[in-house]
């Protein structure tokens, strides 16, 4: 049948046109809990705040940039402190999702600028360039499951209510031109009830809870170390050309004897692989298999893949998908040279080894007989 055979996995996109997909970190917590201060401290400890914004590996986004455009009636209420800015409906979740999806595809995005004095979006935008890590902070970052599921790490900044209220009063009076009575009325009427109903219950989704906010340097340093590991992995990943959105081809080479071709038998054929996390470099210690029949949903409604798994070491969600249209037989005329029999589209997972097992079918050279369940490991 098939004489000595060998296989190899070949990068199909050596031109480097891969997608730079970042590690997304959601940061939530009550109003004035210190979310932006925590993000700023992380940037400072990583030395990112001194780097040109077009070259940063870590960037910060705020949910405050995505408030809905108010109608004239709503704007009049907002001017009197009678509009609830802490309700989920106050945010443009559709735009947040679109922005996150664009970021995950390595695109440069335009972020709206919100004016808290006039309660309106400005005509200007802030340009956010592709980065390795994105910190997205806001009071309701974990409220929508569709948005929440896009984050590989979720932080909750937990600060006592008295501290948060005092900070909010000072901020709204000094930075936003509010009157004390208006600030307190809005807090009692909208902010406190909304925190208890919409924000606080999402604390259970956090991977890390940070008491005392930016003052908790122990917690922040641990997070910074984790991000540094991600950045180091990202540098290695770019140097090796193994980025997300890459295609890898499984190439087969054999000497065919008495058969015209050999091919995987059916969509349920098991492709046994060893997989490497492109983020942290962890390689699976056991063989894992995928089939063309497998279909698992990707987070955020981004379609499906043959395998979706969370890395045990760095917690990043990765995926690999069999490109069914690329599955092709190895023919007699291909003998003694490498030929790609299947391609995999990889986002975060890199196939590093393949183990051929039973499940191949061969067609006889002198007859039309089919020889099923051929195991290429057997000599």
Image: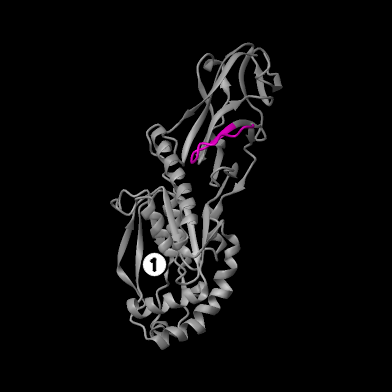
Q: Where does label 1 land, which residue? A: 65
Position in image of residue 115 (x %, y %): 33, 73
Name the residue located 60 percent from the left edge and 62 percent from the top edge: 204
**Residue 6, quarter of picture:** top right
Verify whether residue 278 appears in magenta.
yes
> Circle 1: is it few (<14), some (14-19), or many (20+) Cα within 10 Å?
some
Indicate the quadrant containing the N terminus: top left, top right, bottom left or bottom right.
top right
Picture quadrant of residue 307: top right
> Magenta region: which residues?
274-286
Residue 308 or residue 340, whichever sits in front? 308
The C terminus sits in image quarter: top right
- Taking 376 as reference, is 166 above or below it? below
- Using the image as rendered, state which of residue 81 and residue 297 is in the foreground: 81
Is residue 65 magenta-colored?
no
Tell me which colouring the rendered structure shows: one colour
- Assign a secondary structure to mark 1: helix
Give the answer, above or below, for where 322 lies relative to 79: above
**Residue plotted at (38% across, 39% down):** 17
The residue positioned 56% from the left and 31% from the top of the image is 327
Image x and y of residue 40, in percent = 38, 59
Can the viewer see residue 62 in this picture?
no
Coordinates of residue 45 in the picture (x, y in percent): 38, 52
Q: Can residue 273 be seen?
A: yes
């Amino acid at each position: 049948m098939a004489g000595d055979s060998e296989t190899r996995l070949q990068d199909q996109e050596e031109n480097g046109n891969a997608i730079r997909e970042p590690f997304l970190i959601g940061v939530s917590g009550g109003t004035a809990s210190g979310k932006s201060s925590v993000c700023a401290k992380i940037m400072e400890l990583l030395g990112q705040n001194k780097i040109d914004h077009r070259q940063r590996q870590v960037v910060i986004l705020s949910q405050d940039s995505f408030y809905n455009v108010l109608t004239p009636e709503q704007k009049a209420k907002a001017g009197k402190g009678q509009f609830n800015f802490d309700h989920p409906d106050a945010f443009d979740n559709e735009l947040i999702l679109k922005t996150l999806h664009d970021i995950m595809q390595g695109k440069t995005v335009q972020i709206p600028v919100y004016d808290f004095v006039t309660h309106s979006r400005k005509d200007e935008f802030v340009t956010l360039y592709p980065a390795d890590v994105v910190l997205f902070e806001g009071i309701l970052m974990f409220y929508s499951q569709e948005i929440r599921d896009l984050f590989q790490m979720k932080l909750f900044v937990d600060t006592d209510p008295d501290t948060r209220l005092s900070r909010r009063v000072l901020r709204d009076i000094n930075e936003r031109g509010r009157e004390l009575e208006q600030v307190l009325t809005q807090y009692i009427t909208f902010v406190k009830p909304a925190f208890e109903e919409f924000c606080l219950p999402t604390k259970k989704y956090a991977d890390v809870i940070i008491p005392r906010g930016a003052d908790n340097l122990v917690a922040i340093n641990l997070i910074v170390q984790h991000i540094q590991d991600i950045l180091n992995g990202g540098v290695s990943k770019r140097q090796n050309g193994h980025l997300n959105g890459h295609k890898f081809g499984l190439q087969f080479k054999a000497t065919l004897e008495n058969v015209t071709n050999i091919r995987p038998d059916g969509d349920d054929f098991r492709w046994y692989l060893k997989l490497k996390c492109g983020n942290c470099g962890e390689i699976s210690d056991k063989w894992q298999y995928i089939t063309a029949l497998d279909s698992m949903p990707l987070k955020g409604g981004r379609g499906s893949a043959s395998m979706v798994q969370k890395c045990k070491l760095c917690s990043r969600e990765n995926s690999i998908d069999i490109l069914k249209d690329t599955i092709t037989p190895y023919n007699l005329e291909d003998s003694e040279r490498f030929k790609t029999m299947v391609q995999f589209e990889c986002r975060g997972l890199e196939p590093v080894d393949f183990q051929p097992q039973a499940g191949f079918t061969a067609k006889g050279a002198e007859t039309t007989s089919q020889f099923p369940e051929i195991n290429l490991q057997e000599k």
